Amino acid sequence: MNAITENQSYSAELARRDLGVVWHPCTQMKDHETLPMIAIRRGSGAWLEDFDGKRYLDAVSSWWVNLFGHSNPRINAALADQLGNLEHVIFAGFTHEPAIRLAEQLVALTPAELTRCFFADNGSAAVEVAIKMSFHYWQNRGMPKKARFLTLQNSYHGETLGALAVGNVELYKTLYKPLLMDVLTAPSPDCYYREAGESWESYSLRQFAHMERLLAHHAWELAAVIVEPLVQCAGGMRMYHPVYLSRLRDACTRYGVHLIADEIAVGFGRTGTMFACEQAGITPDFLCLSKGLTGGYLPLSAVLTTENIYGAFYDEYTKLTAFLHSHSYTGNPLACTAALATLDIFATDHVIERNRTKAAYLGRRARELENHAHVAEVRQCGMILAVEFVKNKARREPYPWAERRGQRIYRNSLQKGVLLRPVGNVVYFMPPYVVDEAEMDLMVQVAADGIELATCD
């Protein structure tokens, strides 16, 4: 048996073993009766390789986490060095240099008012931390009625119960509603629904009027508003203008309500600036970070907050004001080291500037799809680009969700060596920042082929 045949045999064996014991996330496992599970052997740059030697361009950064390519030499070297010193230590009563340095750098990178960094394990955990901190702050300040949260229609903040409650994508939320706290929901500023000829700014301002009214009527009972700045990612890569954030910050300050910015998906350069809030010139009360924080290497999240909020918890133990929230792997040294190596690449390689050139190229290529008979919109925010395909372009009538047209694109893209994972009827690109023009050409072409295949009947 030659090497290729052996690898193919082993790949099939891994897939068989996987389906015997593993339950995969965000997956109807029955699909894999006809959709082969792909066992990945290695990754390099923007590419993944399976055991058959077939390569896949990772156009979605493996669920939006990978920034500087798979098996990045600089991050690898930093982790190898840290492995020889410390893998983990309890983070209550103990500390270590990687966590301290990372907190210092995050505080330095974010707005001046954000002076405190609380570490957690993943994006959902960061949202849980932020909403608990906000609620707890008002309790400690003697305002117990401020216990509700206000979110945006079509928002997504994670899958744990608190994070799920403050999200609004019904696909994820509906079944679990009996388990969730009650929240208020404002109409989204999603500019896909703007009138013909209406600008993103005008529509976002018009939509803010709804948020203003809810804040005016409910400020007395609201702890915080939570939003995904600029892009509602899991909600279909829907986008809005920074002016909405500016108005929201002003209103939250006027009404005495916290603002939680969930930059888990959009932080670290995805929207064209290091953090999306920069484009509105605002400082949230809580900034949630994860995904790209470690360059896609290890689970880690951080919540940045203000000295005022930190001070509300700082007192004698017997006052029972402490924030008693913990994760076993809080501040893990290896994860912090990966994050430090990631931030070092930002600091030395002019990443944001280079991404502007790449984003412009990707946008030019993708906008060629606007002429397709079933493409309603091509939209972009920095290194996030989305193509919305529809049943009827003139009426923007979507295809029924049960037809799963996006899965046709997914299957076709894998056959052609590109990992695309559409969100419903939206094909999107969120590639690692190491992607080059030829790879972007391939992404767009495979997406175009997939849309043609998915809409031909």
Image (spheres, grey):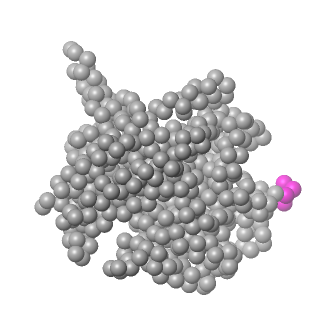
x, y percentage for residue 84? 64, 23
306 magenta-colored = no
Residue that appears at 52% across and 46% down: 351
In front: 358, or 52?
358
x, y percentage for residue 210? 51, 82
Q: How many marks?
A: 0
x, y percentage for residue 4? 24, 21
In-image side of 139 versus 433 (left or right): right
In front: 306, or 353?
353
Tell me if I can see residue 299 in this picture. Answer: no
Residue that appears at 87% across and 56% down: 316
Residue that appears at 62% across and 62% down: 131
Q: Which residues are magenta?
A: 315-319
In-image side of 249 versus 238 (left or right): right
- In the picture as drawn, the residue positioned furthest to the top comes out as 1
In front: 349, or 402?
349
On screen, residue 336 above or below 221: above
- Where, quadrant-wise, is the C terminus in this rendering? bottom left
Tell me if I can see residue 375 in this picture. Answer: yes
In front: 198, or 452?
198
